[in-house]
Amino acid sequence: MPDIERVVHAAAARYEHDATQLLQILIAVQDELGYLSPPALTAIATTLNIPRSRVQGVAGFYSFLYTEPVGRYRILFADNITDRMLGAPLLLDELCRKLWLERGKLSEDGLVSIDTTSCTGLCDQGPALLVNGRVVTRVDHRRINRIAELVRRQVPVEDWPAEFFHIDDNICRRDALLGTPFKPGSALIAAMRLGRNDWLQEMHKSKLRGRGGAGFTTAVKWTGCRDAPGQQKVIVCNAYEGEPGTFKDRVLLNSFADHVFEGMTLASWATGAQLGLVYLRGEYRYLWPALHEVLERRRAAGLLGKAILGTPGFDFDIQFHLGAGSYVCGEETALLESLEGKRGTPRIRPPFPVVRGYLGRPTVVNNVETLAKTCLIALQGGSAFAATGTRQSTGTKLLSVSGDCAAPGIYEYPFGVSIAKVLDDCGASDTQAVQVGGASGMMMATYEFHRSIACEDVPSAGAFMVFDSSRDPFEIAHNFVDFFVHESCGFCTPCRLGTTLLKGYMDKIARGYGAKVDLADIDWVNRLLKNASHCGLGTTAPNPVVDTLVKFRPAYERRMQSLDFEPAFDLDAELETARRLTGRADPAAYLNGNNEARP
Amino acid sequence: MNREFMLDGLPVAFTEGQTILQAARAAGRYIPSLCWHPDFPPHGSCKLCIVKANGRHVSACALPAREGMEVESDTPEINGERRALLQMLFVEGNHFCPSCEKSGNCQLQAQAYELEMTSARFDYLFPVRPVDASHPDILLDFNRCIFCELCVRASRDVDGKHIFALTERGIHKHLVVNAESGRLSDTDFAADDLAAHICPVGVILHKRVGFQRPIGQRDYDHEPISQVAMEESS
């Protein structure tokens, strides 16, 4: 098929036939061909001169890469709990009905398919959906009607109403980062005036900790990378904001991109790295053109490229990589694997990325927000930065507030802010629980609202999902369990099976067949996930269930018919096929003798 | 310099760079494992070799030993967790030991005996995994795959053929072969490849030799895997 050959050659040429760009090439080929057919995978392997098995392995890993035919319109409803609370499941059913198709199946004419996807980072303006990778916000019944019409009339997505794709920043509270005017280049000039070593000293003084959730001290990472043997060091910006309920990086990249790129350049100044990579989640692809403009502007201003600001030997530039739907790629070593064009499987640590990272080179991986914060440190000095927040968690934190509150959006607070204060500010009332830190974070009950957001108390990558008393904690946990099953990379036994078995128990309880013994089994599976998993995804996957079982146990128990043993299936319902085959409907054909299976 | 760590209260000598598991084996001490192979770098996927080092769970195959480390391995707590990991592997695939050609030579089965697994405990998943009998000399029965990737690694790193790879992810992860048709006969796989001899379970089977060695006279029929493995490495 010459068409496939042509497309594959063009995509491979764009990435200089570099096999480490395999993921980017797969995305480019799929953009042209709609899906990655077996001959397309073969052509990619041949063109790049790599084994076909490797190409198939990678293509199958990412949920936005399709190895089976998909509709010309691929509609994916965000399935985070906040989208569900805003009615996403009903809207999905409605669109399926209007377009006469079943969820997850391609329509007969190959026109459209509808399914769900993990959180798209638009919880403040949901429910959201992706149509051919583009984000539609604030989906309601009217928008569903119009989408059904647009699909039926086969209007190209580029010609859909622009307001569908409108995304607000929703910044509700500004502090040091969001509230201070910033002139691109100013932080860099300040740090360069200090010299590389003194600049790193300022970073140490600031005690800045990573904003991606783990809270590792940034200056220690930078020092480790600077001191690691090897010349070609790398700065990676982790813009894979996949944690459900988190959308602060979306806003930073949209309106504060100069901070982020300048932060990467500051990291380069401290470590001597010459290559910068931004790994952007596929859901944020719409940001790509604007981000490229910022990069171009910075290059033109001498803030990127060779001899930055006229300093010989200070060379640094930034490239972009696009993700394709895989939460685990937010884990720094899985991210590095993905950047190298492989399956996003977390590596064995040690060695840590600062010693052996991207292509074996010393690599710093920092979160978007962490990098943006370094500009403040360059401008105000490390001590001034360390004077805000708490002693162990300095500076401010961006919270992505969503769920049951009057004003969802981005709130910037000094670390140490209490949960109660945030709830007050965002206009939440009758709050039953707050999920801090996303699906892998902590579910806080009312008696814990005095606690504070800080690495030493309630750590958070930024998610803050509010649930009022009308919500069911079991359903929240169930949603997060579904998320982890979908996102487990499947590398290690405890996570691959643990998440799957956990979903089995949660589904069973949801169906009304749960029993006390299941709760004991859940505890056991949770323990294995926590103790034996290979990476943070597995160790944190049980958190929502552990927390809700401890703090909201009645939500589980009230779904149980009996607190003792209950079989996993309904024997009478299982006889339905036999009844249909034999045409029997008399009382003797039913176990309970009353002509109906149990609901 | 002679350096030591403590394994279940007894000293084990190690050299710089050795992992806990390597040092233990070299000292004649067994730590259960499935995806680890002495000729390959650590993989760390099966997690059967979990131990507690200074109170923290780690993979013994991957963590370098350190002076003075306190390692707990053969304890009711750790063996209980290992048993559960085995139970997970058993419910994930379709493992019918009595009719399996690998019975008695299978490391998964042997570990189940070693760790006294008497039931599968969890609900079976019963996945649908068709066999591939296309190759003239080799049968692939994917029902038994435990994703140790030893065939992937052997074919890639030793045979230089890249016959096997994993695709998809999570619970849907599965083994594929290096052919557009998906059939082993369309690859250059050969019966004398290392990858054809490395499967610890019954996925990669040689044709026409089935049951040549009767069940009852096989590797793990008379001695537990903890002893067989130590004899092999000594």
Image (cartoon, rainbow, N blue to C red):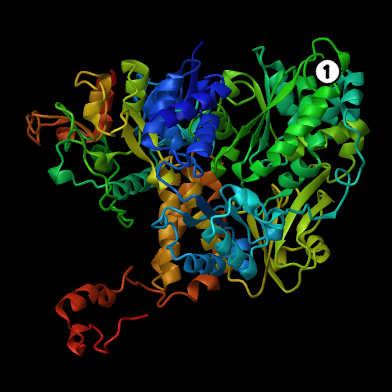
> Where's residue A120, x and y in %?
62, 51
**In this figure, what is the number of numbered marks?**
1
Asked whether residue B30 is in view, the answer is: no
Front position in the image: A49 or A462: A49
The picture places residue B105, in percent across and down from the top left corner, at 19, 33
A247 on left or right of A312: left
Q: Residue at x 36, y 21 (%)?
A: B156
Q: Quadrant of the C terminus of chain B?
A: top left
Circle 1 marks a residue in which chain?
A: A
Residue B168 screen position, x and y as percent: 41, 41
Up the image or down, A437 lies above or below B176; here it is below
Residue located 79% across and 47% down the image: A397
Front residue of A357 and A552? A357
Along the line of sight, which residue is nearer the eye, A244 or A545? A244
Q: Quadrant of residue A54?
A: top left
Who is closer to the viewer here, A514 or A187?
A: A187
Residue A224 appears left or right of A41? right
Specify whether A157 is left or right of A345. Answer: right
Instruction: Determine which quarter of the picture holds residue A537.
Output: top right
Residue position for label 1:
A308
Label 1 neighbour load within 10 Å: few <14, some 14-19, many 20+: many
The residue at 31%/70% (across/down) is A569
- Amino acid under disc 1: Ile
Of helix, strand and loop, which one carries label 1? helix
